[in-house]
Image (cartoon, coloured by chain):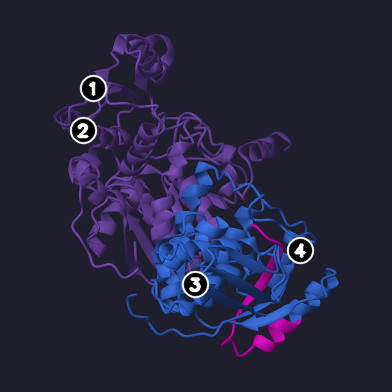
Chain colours: A purple, B blue
């Protein structure tokens, strides 16, 4: 591949979709806008598994997900001709389910009954175990446990390092932790001083805050994924659903960028950081587009019913002394590249 | 420093000899070139005169080999494309530096293949070189690094900035890539004082540090066009001296940002 290559058509729709667009929004604020970020690890992990012989055309891919990672897997499996079973819960969005099934995936829903004994997550894992026993030749990508998902983001790091003369900060919404751990880990080889800001949401346990109901799906986690490397983060923000939805709407109304709510949360934190650091360059990772949220985030009636209409977004986050103190307001904690254990032990010492 | 090779071709005996006799890579290069020129009946003498120290990662054996190939071609009044010369060099020494090319490119040194051709000459870079380890390293007995999957994917990030640095002649960017590559190589051929060298790099505001990945030389690199160059190199020399490194080599790349035409 030469640096002076003329442009050519994409050879595949997945390939055409996989990389983000880097967009300057205003001043030093940039977006890395993905159509479907999870396509990237899905493509990478399945390709590597094929190369390493863990996966053949007779292998069934089995994964538990009700979200965009399932859609990524379904797209890649269809193109590679691999059978796919996705284990989801009854809350799976109907349009997403139709799309998965149109792509040839089997969607296995864990019923309400099965969830009563040990919670929905456990019920889904039990279902995966049963399916794997029934399909002796199966492969489970394991988006929360398999470190190969981190390696998938080398291509994004390449796009960023080629496009920016200088990058001061990276803002990443954190769910599984693979994109933040991946992109920042690679970029720090070149820019060790790069500031990594994690965006989480109240109710998520990722960065030591109390477990609770999360109204903003796709952000945060009720469990601790193995792929997340806490020691890369300089600071963490928790953005509540209302603030994220409002900023998602503004991102569309002001910049015409039609993205999902985790992108709004990312935009919110990047804007704040840019205000505090004039002249610096900050890149906000934006994981998916807005079409899936037409009936929710982009619907005034729905926002009113949820009590999330016309949210006043404050100019500053609440500075908290410890993640354990988190309330349902936009908050910031200086993580300072520590492990989760170091931070959690700091509270026990108080 | 440089290498000079004299070749005398004889049509009478199909044997090749080299002086000094331990320059066997040059001998193999002469044989391989003659074979490719379809001169199997020919032999000759190869005389190598070089003042490049061996085993430091300064490309001494590649210089011997390329000079030999070019001398054989001259003697026979023949020409070969540079990419062909690269493959002969790899055949002769199993791992070659891309010194046969006149421009920036990414080169698979054990395959002799161009991975990415930036098609630009290197910008003007000032190098303060030194020996980062006491003993020479033999490229061929040194096992090639077994990179982890993470390390292999991390090369993408390095290539992104390398591309930008090459095309824009941005020495600061190229220095960052060199430093990142040096960091990755610490797992395979560690330099004892590496953290202190990084400190000297920061203190002297060098663009980066470059290390031989199978050799013992290293160098702090600077933008030769920097108006503050003299002060920066002076700071670097002082830092190295404090670390016990008093022997240094200073040199600059020729510097030419003109696009070179297609080969």
User: What residue does disc 3 label?
Assistant: B100
Residue A212 numbered mark, or none = none
Q: Chain of mark 1?
A: A
- How far apart in space, not on screen, are marks 4 and 2 (Cα)? 52 Å
Residue at the outermost bottom position: B227
Give the camera-side residue of A2 and B221.
Answer: A2
- Whole-angstrom CA distance, mark 2 to mark 3, is 46 Å
Is the N terminus of chain A in the top left, top right, bottom left or bottom right quadrant?
A: bottom left
The correct choice, above or below, for A309 with respect to A1 in the image is above
* Front in this rendered view, residue B176 or A302: B176
Looking at this rendering, what residue extends furthest in the front direction?
B12
The CA span between labels 3 and 4 is 34 Å
The residue carrying mark 4 is B196
Residue A162 placement (x, y as % from top left): 41, 65
Q: CA distance from mark 3 to mark 1?
A: 58 Å
Report the span colored magenta: B214-234
Write down the residue under mark 1: A107
- At 63% from the left and 75% from the top, the residue drawn is B221
Write down the residue under mark 2: A78
Query: From what the image shows, is residue A344 above or below residue A15?
Result: above
Q: For this rendering, which residue is in front, A122 or B210?
A: B210
Please tell me whether mark 2 sits on a helix, a strand or a loop: helix
Expressed as whole percent of the image width and height from the top left, the position of residue A145 reads 48, 30
Q: Nearer the viewer, mark 3 or mark 4?
A: 3
Which callout, 2 or 3, points to the residue nearer the camera? 3
| Residue at 56% across, 49% down | A233
Does mark 4 fall on the same chain as mark 1? no
């Amino acid at each position: 591949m030469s640096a002076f290559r003329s442009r050519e058509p994409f050879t595949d729709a997945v390939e055409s979709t996989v990389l983000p667009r880097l967009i300057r929004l205003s001043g030093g604020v940039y977006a890395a806008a993905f159509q479907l970020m999870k396509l990237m690890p899905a493509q990478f992990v399945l390709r590597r598994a094929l190369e390493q012989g863990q996966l053949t055309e007779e292998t069934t891919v089995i994964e538990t997900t009700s979200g965009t990672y399932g859609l990524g897997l379904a797209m890649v499996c269809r193109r590679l001709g691999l059978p796919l079973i996705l284990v989801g819960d009854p809350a799976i969005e109907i349009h997403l389910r139709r799309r998965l099934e149109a792509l040839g995936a089997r969607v296995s829903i864990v019923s309400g009954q099965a969830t009563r004994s040990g919670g929905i997550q456990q019920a889904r894992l039990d279902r995966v175990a049963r399916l794997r026993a029934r399909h002796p030749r199966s492969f489970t990508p394991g988006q929360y446990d398999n470190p190969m998902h981190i390696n998938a983001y080398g291509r994004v790091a390449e796009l960023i390092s080629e496009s920016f003369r200088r990058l001061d900060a990276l803002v990443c919404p954190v769910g599984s932790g693979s994109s933040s751990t991946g992109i920042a880990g690679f970029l720090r080889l070149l820019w060790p001083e790069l500031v990594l800001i994690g965006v989480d949401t109240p109710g998520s346990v990722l960065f030591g805050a109390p477990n609770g109901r999360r109204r903003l799906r796709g952000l945060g986690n009720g469990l601790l994924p193995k792929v997340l490397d806490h020691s890369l983060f300089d600071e963490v923000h928790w953005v509540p659903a209302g603030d994220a939805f409002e900023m998602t709407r503004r991102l569309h109304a002001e910049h015409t960028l039609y993205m999902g709510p985790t992108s709004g949360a990312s935009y919110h934190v990047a804007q704040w950081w840019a205000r505090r650091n004039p002249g610096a360059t900050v890149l906000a990772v934006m994981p998916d587009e807005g079409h899936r949220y037409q009936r929710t985030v982009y619907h005034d009636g729905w926002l009113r019913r949820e009590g999330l209409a016309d949210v006043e977004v404050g100019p500053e986050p609440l500075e908290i002394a410890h993640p354990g103190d988190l309330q349902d307001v936009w908050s910031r904690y200086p993580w300072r590249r520590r492990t989760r254990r170091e931070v959690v032990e700091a509270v026990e010492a108080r | 420093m440089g290498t000079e090779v004299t070749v005398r071709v004889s049509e009478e005996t199909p044997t090749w000899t080299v002086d000094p006799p331990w320059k066997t890579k040059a001998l193999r290069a002469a044989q391989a070139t003659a074979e490719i020129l379809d001169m199997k009946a020919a032999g000759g003498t190869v005389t190598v005169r070089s003042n490049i120290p061996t085993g430091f990662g300064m490309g001494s054996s590649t210089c011997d080999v390329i000079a030999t190939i070019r001398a054989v071609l001259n003697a026979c009044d023949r020409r070969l494309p540079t990419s062909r010369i690269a493959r002969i060099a790899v055949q002769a020494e199993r791992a070659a530096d891309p010194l046969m090319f006149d421009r920036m490119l990414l080169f698979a040194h054990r395959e002799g293949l161009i991975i990415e051709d930036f098609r630009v000459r290197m910008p003007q870079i000032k190098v303060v070189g030194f020996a980062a380890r006491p003993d020479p390293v033999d490229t061929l007995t040194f096992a090639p690094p077994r990179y982890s999957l993470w390390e292999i994917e991390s090369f993408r990030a390095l290539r992104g900035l390398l591309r930008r640095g090459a095309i824009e002649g941005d020495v600061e960017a190229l220095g960052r890539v060199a430093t990142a590559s040096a960091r990755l190589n610490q797992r395979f051929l560690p330099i004892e004082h590496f953290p202190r060298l990084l400190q000297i790099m920061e203190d002297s505001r060098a663009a980066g540090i470059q290390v031989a990945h199978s050799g013992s030389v290293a160098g702090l690199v600077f933008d030769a066009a920097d108006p503050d160059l003299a002060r920066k190199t002076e700071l670097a020399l002082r830092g190295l001296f404090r670390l016990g490194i008093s022997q240094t080599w200073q040199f600059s790349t020729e510097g030419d940002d003109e696009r070179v035409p297609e080969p």
